[in-house]
Image (cartoon, rainbow, N blue to C red):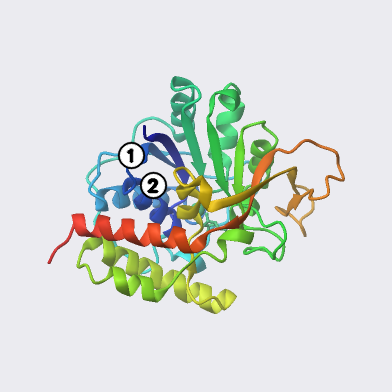
């Protein structure tokens, strides 16, 4: 039976790739995509999500607008990473389908409470929507099946400040609420995802199929690859969010270790820093299953082959 998934996003180039991977994966029944402000302002993110589901041939897949701003901190977007509108050099036709009427936070609550023990929540954005869903309906903590979060930098430099990763830095208070909620969390941090690199070679392979899907991925990734090269010296772009999504149906890609993880929310200098208590100095019980290793090669094969399949479905020549 397919896993019913709620995908919380800030699309965003790699968020868009996560949406495409979800729609290309028979193991996943995507209940909806919720959006929060992050890589780009909320309205851009919602617009992008709608256009991406339409690109994949599923324009009616519901997209829910969520919370625009972090709980306490000022908003921070990432135009240098994802482009001014969030999708790099890609320009998609505007979907004719509007966002769903329901608020993203309410959709998360409704899905989890309507299907106790069945919903996997994949959260690949600042955790504002998820934190507010927990505060509004705490019973979702017990009712959710699994929460897979992309966020945090534990033993590596941050990608946004010297210490902090983007999703956790943008809304550290939300991350704190979620980490300490008691939800069954798998945490896929930047430590791992920075090395999951989609290369130009893989994109060139995808471009063998003439399709709006391959053109979109190539145009978005061109911007993302340039950023990663200039900023980090990487030979490809880190596709963080689809890697988190893949853990729904390929948990075996990850090596995990139970760990107590906390986040800094008070000091401006270290704001959003994720702390892993690897020696259990605090004595706290673990609150996440941390991904400590990941089979990038197998994941990238799955990712590229599913994007080829999606491109093939919408082939133009
Ligand atoms: C995370 O931040 C965003 O830029 C990406 O979409 C990803 O979710 C990586 O730190
Ligand atoms: Ca994201």
131 sits left or right of 215 in the view = right
138 sits left or right of 124 in the view = right
Q: Which of disc 1 and disc 2 is earlier in sequence? A: 2
Residue at 67% x, 41% y is 288
Quadrant position of the C terminus in the picture: bottom left
Q: Position of residue 258 (x, y in %)?
A: 70, 43
Q: In front here: 298 or 236?
A: 298
Name the residue tied to disc 2. 46
- Say which mark, if any, is on residue 99: 1
Q: In front here: 238 or 304?
A: 304
Q: Position of residue 134 (x, y in %)?
A: 59, 29
Quarter of the rendering containing residue 32: top left
Q: Up-down: is 60 above or below 225?
A: above
- Residue 273 is at least partly visible in this image: yes
| Contact between labelled residues 1 and 2, with CB atoms less than 8 Å apart | yes
- For mark 2, does the 10 Å Cα neighbourhood hold few (<14), some (14 to 19), or many (20 or more) residues? many
Q: Position of residue 188 (x, y in %)?
A: 59, 51
Quadrant position of the N terminus in the picture: top left
């Amino acid at each position: 039976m397919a896993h019913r998934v709620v995908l919380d996003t800030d699309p965003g180039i790699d968020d868009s790739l996560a949406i495409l991977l979800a729609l290309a994966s028979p193991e996943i029944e995507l209940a909806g995509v919720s959006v929060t402000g992050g890589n780009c302002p909320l309205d851009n993110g919602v617009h992008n999500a709608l256009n991406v589901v339409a690109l994949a041939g599923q324009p009616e897949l519901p997209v829910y607008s969520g919370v625009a701003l972090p709980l306490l901190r000022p908003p921070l977007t990432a135009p240098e990473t994802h482009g001014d509108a969030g999708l790099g050099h890609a320009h998609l036709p505007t979907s004719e389908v509007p966002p769903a009427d329901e608020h993203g936070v309410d959709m998360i609550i409704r899905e989890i409470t309507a299907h106790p023990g069945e919903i996997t929540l994949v959260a690949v954005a600042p955790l504002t929507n998820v934190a507010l869903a927990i505060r509004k309906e705490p019973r979702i903590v017990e009712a959710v099946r699994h929460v897979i979060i992309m966020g945090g930098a534990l033993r590596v430099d941050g990608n946004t400040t010297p210490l902090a990763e983007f999703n956790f830095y943008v809304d550290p208070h939300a991350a704190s609420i979620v980490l300490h909620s008691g939800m069954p969390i798998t945490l896929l941090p930047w430590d791992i995802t920075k090395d999951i690199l989609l290369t130009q070679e893989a994109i060139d392979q995808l471009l063998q199929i003439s399709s709006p899907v391959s053109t979109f991925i190539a145009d978005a990734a061109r911007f993302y690859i340039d950023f990663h090269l200039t900023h980090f010296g990487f030979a490809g772009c880190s596709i963080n969010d689809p890697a988190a999504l893949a853990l729904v149906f390929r948990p075996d890609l990850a090596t995990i270790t139970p760990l107590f993880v906390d986040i800094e929310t008070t000091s401006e200098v270290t704001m959003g820093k994720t702390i892993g208590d690897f020696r259990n100095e605090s004595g706290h019980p673990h609150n996440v299953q941390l991904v400590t290793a990941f089979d990038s090669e197998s994941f990238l094969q799955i990712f590229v082959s599913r994007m080829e399949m999606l491109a093939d479905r919408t082939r133009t020549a």
